[in-house]
Image (cartoon, helix red, strand yellow):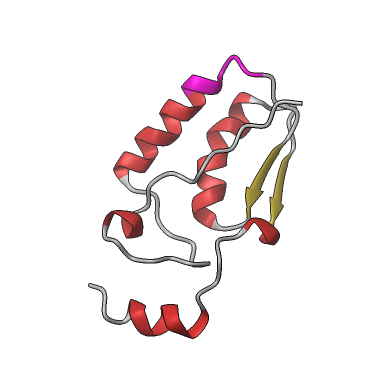
Amino acid sequence: MHLILIRHAETIENHRGIIQGQRPGQISELGKQQITAVAETLKHETVDAIYSSDLLRCIETAQPLRQLYKDAPLILSSELREFSYGKFLNSQSNSNP
């Protein structure tokens, strides 16, 4: 078995230094380029399934792979989500622009 791990593409929040936790995030322009580059790099791989967090930034990162590997199911799971920072994140997010 061959396992390929991919982190979600850069989000606007990543670029601004904002901790997202389990918030969805919005893919940045650089992130869109990263997604294209990953799909191009992996286009010759054999993929049986794509597992992703159910957070929007992760789903958007997985979509080009889903298009590339049409027979591979995209399996979304909340168990693959980023760590939740709970109330700490909520109080910190109010101080970020």
Q: Is residue 40 depicted above or below 76 in this figure?
A: above
Camera-side residue of 67 and 93 = 93
At horizontal 63% and vertical 18% (from top left) the residue drawn is 45
At horizontal 39% and vertical 49% (from top left) the residue drawn is 27
Q: Is residue 92 left or right of residue 5?
A: left
Residue 65 in the image, given as x and y percentages of width and height: 58, 31
Q: Is residue 45 left or right of residue 40?
A: right
Q: Quadrant of the N terminus?
A: top right
For the image shown, how many numbered marks are present on the structure? 0
Residue 68 in the image, given as x and y percentages of width and height: 60, 25
Q: Is residue 5 left or right of residue 16?
A: right
Residue 73 in the image, given as x and y percentages of width and height: 74, 37
At horizontal 59% and vertical 37% (from top left) the residue drawn is 5
Is residue 42 magenta-colored?
yes
Q: Residue furthest left?
A: 97
At horizontal 55% and vertical 72% (from top left) the residue drawn is 84
Q: Is residue 12 left or right of residue 46?
A: left
Q: Quadrant of residue 47?
A: top right
Residue 93 in the image, given as x and y percentages of width and height: 35, 77
Is residue 11 magenta-colored?
no
Q: Quadrant of the C terminus?
A: bottom left
Magenta part of the chain: 40-45
